[in-house]
Structure formats: structure tokens, C-alpha cells
């Protein structure tokens, strides 16, 4: 291209709608239902209700949102949604009877590792907006609390993880709501806070 030719104004993925609403929605709903069990609000016998959500909405739909974020050129969104979509699919696999060999220590280490991943994504999320940053702060705490509970520190840790998980789900739902409502109203109806 010569210096006299105009530079392209093509934006990667400009033709793709913002997938954040889908990704946050899938994450929020699945997290909410599981957190009701972890917090002790619903009996553990209700946990199978999470499995379908974990596979379809938290897993496949959120993973798809991550792929669309790749198309849009959003490395953070692509990594976050694809990873947490994979988290929910692996959670479905581990807990729905597909793999019965998972020990409490194995599950605890799995949750701890996700906590580490979420912690470094939390640092990156500080440059997105207040809502997403809040989701990642709460989710990091949730993973560590649940891991400590599964390491045998006591059911209080798991219950606390469930309550923080509920707060995480509400924050993520708000983010999904804000993305949809602000787009459809063509103005900021639901504030998301400034970028970092």
C-alpha cells in the first residue's frame, strides 16, 4: 500500500454483535443455581439441576461467546468466556457421573487452579469496566473459598463460597442486563462504570 492510499478503517468483528451479554448471562445463571446449593439455600440433592445449565448455557453458549469475542479482536473477552465456558463443560463432566474418580482433593485442586486463573484475569479486568472488575474480584474469592471447603477446612468455607458466588452471579447478570439494555435503548440506561 502506498503512503497516498487511505488506511483501512475496518474494525475486526464490527459486523458481530457484542457477545458479552450472552457470555455474562450464561455464566450468571449457571453460577446462581450452583451457588444456591453451595450456600445451603437449596439441598445438595438439587445439584443435578445445574448439570444441564453447566453443559448448555454456562458451557456451550458461553464458549461460543468467547469465539465471537475472538472474531471481534477482544483478547480479554475471548479468553474469559472461552475459558469459563470450558470450566462449566468440565464441571458438568466431573460432577454428573461421567467421571466418578474425582476425589475431594482433586476437586479442591481443580477449584484452586481456577482461582489462580481468575486472579490473573482479575488484574486484566481492572482495565475493562467497574462491573466486569467486580465480577472477577468476587469470582476469585468464590473459587478460593470453595477450594478451601473441598480441602476439608469445613463446610463453612463452602457455604461462604456459595454466598459470594451468589453476589458474583448478580454482578454478572447486571453486566449482561446493562449490555442488552444499553444497546437496545441506544444510550446508557444501566451504567457499567468507567474503564480502568
Image (spheres, rainbow, N blue to C red):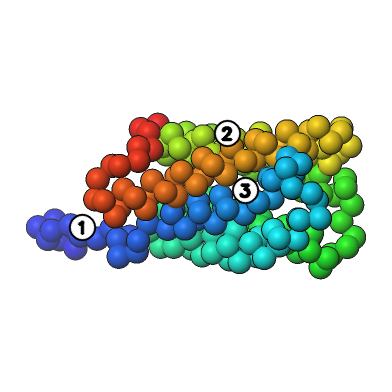
Mark 2 or 1, nearer chain start? 1
Q: Which mark is residue 32?
A: 3
Which residue shows up at 63% across the image and 49% down it? Answer: 31
Q: Is residue 45 visible?
A: yes
Q: Which mark is residue 184?
A: none
**Looking at the image, which is closer to me, 170 or 43?**
43
Mark 3 or 2, nearer chain start? 3
- Crowd band around label 1 with a 10 angstrom C-alpha radius: few (<14), some (14–19), many (20+): few
Mark 3 or 1, nearer chain start? 1
Secondary structure category for the residue under label 2: helix
* Left or right, 186 with reference to 85: left
**Looking at the image, which is closer to me, 140 or 9?**
140
Circle 1 residue: 9
Quarter residue 101 falls in: bottom right
Which residue shows up at 38% across the image and 38% down it? Answer: 192
Circle 2 residue: 137
* Left or right, 178 with reference to 48: left
Quarter residue 97 falls in: bottom right
Return the x and y of residue 154 as percentages of the image width and height. 87, 33
Return the x and y of residue 9 as percentages of the image width and height. 20, 57
Quadrant of the image containing the N terminus: bottom left
Cα gap from disc 3 to disc 2, whole angstroms = 16 Å
- Crowd band around label 2 with a 10 angstrom C-alpha radius: few (<14), some (14–19), many (20+): some
Q: Is residue 111 above or below residue 85?
A: above
* Left or right, 94 with reference to 117: right
* Left or right, 180 with reference to 173: left
Return the x and y of residue 136 as percentages of the image width and height. 56, 38
Return the x and y of residue 193 as percentages of the image width and height. 37, 33
Q: Nearer the viewer, mark 3 or mark 1?
A: 3
Amino acid at each position: 500500500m502506498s503512503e497516498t492510499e487511505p488506511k483501512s478503517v475496518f474494525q475486526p468483528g464490527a459486523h458481530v454483535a457484542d457477545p458479552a451479554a450472552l457470555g455474562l448471562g450464561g455464566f450468571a445463571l449457571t453460577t446462581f443455581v450452583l451457588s444456591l446449593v453451595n450456600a445451603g439455600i437449596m439441598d445438595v440433592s438439587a445439584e443435578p439441576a445445574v448439570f444441564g445449565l453447566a453443559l448448555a448455557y454456562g458451557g456451550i453458549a458461553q464458549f461460543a461467546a468467547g469465539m465471537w469475542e475472538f472474531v471481534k479482536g477482544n483478547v480479554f473477552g475471548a479468553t474469559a468466556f472461552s475459558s469459563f465456558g470450558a470450566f462449566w463443560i468440565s464441571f458438568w463432566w466431573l460432577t454428573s457421573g461421567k467421571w466418578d474418580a474425582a476425589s475431594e482433593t482433586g476437586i479442591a485442586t481443580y477449584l484452586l487452579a481456577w482461582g489462580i486463573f481468575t486472579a490473573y484475569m482479575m488484574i486484566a479486568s481492572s482495565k475493562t469496566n467497574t462491573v466486569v472488575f467486580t465480577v472477577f474480584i468476587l469470582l476469585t474469592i468464590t473459587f478460593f473459598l470453595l477450594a478451601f471447603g473441598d480441602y476439608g477446612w469445613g463446610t463453612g468455607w463452602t457455604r461462604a463460597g456459595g454466598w459470594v458466588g451468589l453476589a458474583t452471579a448478580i454482578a454478572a447478570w447486571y453486566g449482561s442486563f446493562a449490555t442488552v439494555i444499553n444497546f437496545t435503548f441506544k444510550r446508557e440506561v444501566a451504567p457499567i462504570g468507567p474503564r480502568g
